Image: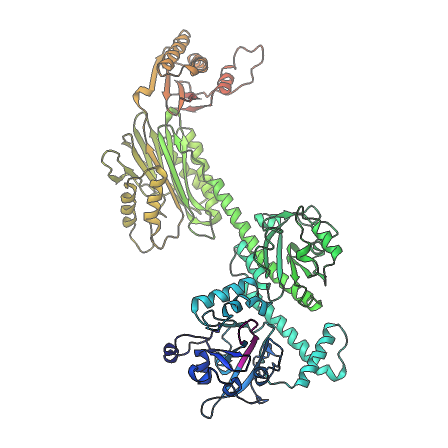
């Protein structure tokens, strides 16, 4: 960006010119042709102090020494167009605003090659003309590294009307967007000096000639050729060279524009950001208004059926960029609105044909037809009289959306060359949008897959509170082989499991899903921890030897206040004691990873107290490349022992302590359980003889216990269902007494144990059948029920929801 400076004279004299910056002179001439304002930039450019310049004739201070030679550098022909002579401008013989290029005498024998702009000053004061000037050689010295140069004004200039001129910047340069104008004025306020800024590829209303000086005759010839080309007429023979030059310049300008747009879009795979980039790339350079519409499925990151869109296809308005005053379009065409388009509209024609649709001017009739789609909003004042080009956003011959491009009535209408340019622009934008769409779709698939594989564990289970966290190892692959789970077991127990399939990506995730399902199934069979890992290892052998996995399995008995754990190559868990707050790594037999085969697994029992916390995680949390894992385990113990207001806060504390270290590339699974236990007063047990008369005793015992616990509302269903279970147990038991147990926790749990290994099944009992109704009653009245085998036989249980207190 090129900027002229109006800093303090001393600083300006001592600081070297920065690359890409040039001085900007600000001169004000009054109605008598005398200088009334002379900036420090003018002193630097022309060498005359302010005290000598004020009050002098402008022509004396800015003498024109002659035209530029024909062999002058033409590397800036994009700004072609010979401006009026500076001497004529100072003498008052021009219409304004005006601009040009001149060679002025400099102190000594030197000369200054100057680009200049002249603007009229209208008001009650004596000032008549504002002149801005910059050293053309200074601009060329940048060797084309600058990107934008445009005339602007500093609010600090000490002549009347400067502040008003700054506010009128969009009027002086109507092709500049409101956002660009605000940015330039804000930059002026912040930096405190004038700004030069316009694109090498833009044509602003007033632009100095950067190329070879042209004669007036040459200018007139080119204007005649341009009018013929614009009207679609053949260029006269004597103007053929001029027409070919104009055509070549126009094609070159379009190619430069497309290359610039291609460089500005696609910087991210984020769909929303890509849409904004595409919209801002064409406004205001190519159009004054750009509205972008995408298919509903594209916005949602979903696939859609093949085929041509129809009148039922919903299109989301995802972006509206314009140069009008802020807010003018927001209420009429808000971003986020979805709507179909009727068949008679040019939008429908574009999205069904896949080709651009050009409307040179939107007539009153067409404006009314388009506005009919907008209920209670009149869009006609915004579109009538404007030129419109609708271009499809396509990729792989599929229309993803379209852009509606509108030009102000005072700008040239869209022509056939604009149609070709718009089609090429839309093709490039369509590919970028399709890449972003596919990335979004794949992200959604990965997240859905991961979410489906991670269990949704309730925060409270029998005798414990649970909190979990999962962090993907990379942003590109949000699925991995880490998992955790909590499985409800009979007797109020809970099984906790954390595992890690070695590797990353979909293959590891698929293996993880199979192992997790197997663990859930075997946990439901109440297999001891060591036996469960043994069976899991056998399963991994049958699945193949491609993958290995580590696994930590723990069963918590809240009534016995005990943990039963077994480890298969996993990092040990941390136990935080509630009494003194200390934490420790549990010393477990490590075992070999699942999949190695032929290695025995051992289990240990650990006594726990109410309030103790068990922390289980995968090695991705504690292991960092280049660092001993002991450091991570020590940090885990320390952070796990940190006091926290809730289980979620405790998990977050661990994550913050360990995840801020650099180098983590692996997935992270974390499970924390607060082992609250179940008080002895909340457990009632009875041993019943194998006598049908014991069924009545069981019902009476349940009734009395529930009254004692203040659960009178549950007496009727609990007594009935307990009687049914005891009846079946007494009937099928062989030698051992039947055991009945009630547990009051978050729910009311009733369990009946016997020594028969045959699990009961739910039957459809007919009207004349004598058996088969017991489990049907239990299934109907209970909150949840189930059966499981034990070492001695089986357990049948049901739960009832506790009444609200």
Nearest the eye: 449 or 199:
199
608 lies left or right of 456:
left
Q: Is residue 479 above or below residue 556?
A: below
Range drawn in magenta: 115-126
Q: Residue furthest left?
A: 580
Q: Please give the name of the residue rendered at 72% of the width and 74% of the height, measured from the top-left corner.
A: 229
Q: Residue furthest bottom?
A: 109
Tell me: residue 294, above or below residue 282: above
Q: Is residue 315 visible?
A: yes
- Is 288 on the left or on the right of 134, as rendered? right
Where on the picture, by quarter, is residue 255?
bottom right
- Residue 159: image x %, image y %? 48, 73
* Pick the front one: 264 or 623: 264
* Residue 336 horizontal side relative to residue 651, left or right: right
x and y, in percent, of residue 168 in the image: 55, 67
- Which residue is nearer to you in this view: 801 or 340? 340
Q: Where is residue 318? Give x, y as percent.
A: 59, 52
Does 578 lie within the magenta span? no
Residue 497: x percent and y percent? 38, 37
Residue 728: image quadrant is: top left
- Residue that appears at 66% across and 49% down: 377
Q: Is residue 737 visible in the rendered structure shown here?
A: no
């Amino acid at each position: 960006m090129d900027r002229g400076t109006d800093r303090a004279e001393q600083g300006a004299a001592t600081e070297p010119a920065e690359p890409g910056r040039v001085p900007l002179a600000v001169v004000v001439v009054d109605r008598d042709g005398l200088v009334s304002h002379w900036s420090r930039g003018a002193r630097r450019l022309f060498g005359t102090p302010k005290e000598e310049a004020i009050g002098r004739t402008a022509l004396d201070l800015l003498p024109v020494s002659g035209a530029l030679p024909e062999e002058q550098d033409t590397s800036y022909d994009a700004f072609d167009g010979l401006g009026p002579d500076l001497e004529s401008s100072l003498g008052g013989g021009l219409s304004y605003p005006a601009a040009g290029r001149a060679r002025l005498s400099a102190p000594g024998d030197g000369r200054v090659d100057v680009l200049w702009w002249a603007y009229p000053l209208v008001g009650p004061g004596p000032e008549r003309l504002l002149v801005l000037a910059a050293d053309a050689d200074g601009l060329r010295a940048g060797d084309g590294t600058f990107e934008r140069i445009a005339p602007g004004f500093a609010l600090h200039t000490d002549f009347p009307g400067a502040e008003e001129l700054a506010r009128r910047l969009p009027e002086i340069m109507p092709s500049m967007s409101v956002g660009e104008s605000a940015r330039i004025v804000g930059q002026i306020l912040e930096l405190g000096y004038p700004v030069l800024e316009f694109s090498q590829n833009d044509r602003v209303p007033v632009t100095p000639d950067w190329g070879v000086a042209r004669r007036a005759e040459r200018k007139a010839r080119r204007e005649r050729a341009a009018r013929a080309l614009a009207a679609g007429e053949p260029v006269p023979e004597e103007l053929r060279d001029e027409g070919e030059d104009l055509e070549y310049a126009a094609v070159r300008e379009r190619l430069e524009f497309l290359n610039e747009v291609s460089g500005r879009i696609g910087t991210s795979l984020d769909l929303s950001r890509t849409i904004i980039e595409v919209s801002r790339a064409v406004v205001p350079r190519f159009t004054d208004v750009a509205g972008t519409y995408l298919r509903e499925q594209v916005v949602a990151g979903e696939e859609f059926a093949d085929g041509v869109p129809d009148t039922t296809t919903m299109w989301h308005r995802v972006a509206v960029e314009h140069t009008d005053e802020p807010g003018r379009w927001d209420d009429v065409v808000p971003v986020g609105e979805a709507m179909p388009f009727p068949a008679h509209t040019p939008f429908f024609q574009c999205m069904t044909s896949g080709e651009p649709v050009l409307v040179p001017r939107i007539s009153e009739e067409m404006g009314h037809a388009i506005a009919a789609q907008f209920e209670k909003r009149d869009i006609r004042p915004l579109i009538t009289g404007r030129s419109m080009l609708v271009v499809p956003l396509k990729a792989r011959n599929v229309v993803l959306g379209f852009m509606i491009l509108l030009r102000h009535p005072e700008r040239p209408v869209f022509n056939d060359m604009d149609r070709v340019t718009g089609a090429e622009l839309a093709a490039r934008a369509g590919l970028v949008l399709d890449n972003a769409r596919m990335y979004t779709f794949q992200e959604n698939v990965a997240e859905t897959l991961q979410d489906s594989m991670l269990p949704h564990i309730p925060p409270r289970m029998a005798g414990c509170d649970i909190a979990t966290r999962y962090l993907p190892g990379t942003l590109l692959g949000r699925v991995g082989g880490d998992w955790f789970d909590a499985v409800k077991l009979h007797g109020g127990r809970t099984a906790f499991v954390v595992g890690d399939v070695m590797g990353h990506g979909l293959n590891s995730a698929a293996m993880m899903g199979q192992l997790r399902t197997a663990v859930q199934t075997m946990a439901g069979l109440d297999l001891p921890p060591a036996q469960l890992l043994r069976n899991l290892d056998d399963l991994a052998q049958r699945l193949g030897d491609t993958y290995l996995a580590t696994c930590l399995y723990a069963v918590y008995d809240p009534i016995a206040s005990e943990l039963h754990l077994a480890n298969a190559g996993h990092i040990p868990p941390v136990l935080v004691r509630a009494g003194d707050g200390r934490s420790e790594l549990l010393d477990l037999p490590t075992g070999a990873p699942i999949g190695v085969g032929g290695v025995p697994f051992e289990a240990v029992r650990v006594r726990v107290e109410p309030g103790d916390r068990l922390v289980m995680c995968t090695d991705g949390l504690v292991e960092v490349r280049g660092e001993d894992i002991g450091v991570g385990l020590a940090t885990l113990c320390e952070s796990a022992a940190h006091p926290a207001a809730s289980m979620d806060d405790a998990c977050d504390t661990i994550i913050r302590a360990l995840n801020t270290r650099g180098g983590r590339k692996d997935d992270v699974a974390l499970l924390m359980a607060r082992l609250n236990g179940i008080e002895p007063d909340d457990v009632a047990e009875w041993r019943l003889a194998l006598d049908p008369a014991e069924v009545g005793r069981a019902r009476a015992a349940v009734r009395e216990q529930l009254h004692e616990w203040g659960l009178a509302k549950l007496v009727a269903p609990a007594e009935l269902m307990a009687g049914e279970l005891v009846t079946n147990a007494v009937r099928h038991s062989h030698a051992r007494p039947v055991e009945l147990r009630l547990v009051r926790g978050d729910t009311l749990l009733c369990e009946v144990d016997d020594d028969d290994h045959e699990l009961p099944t739910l039957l459809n009992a007919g009207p004349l059948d004598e058996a088969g109704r017991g489990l049907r009653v239990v299934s109907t009245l209970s909150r949840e029920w189930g059966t499981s085998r034990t070492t001695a036989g089986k357990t049948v249980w049901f739960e009832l929801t506790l009444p609200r207190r």
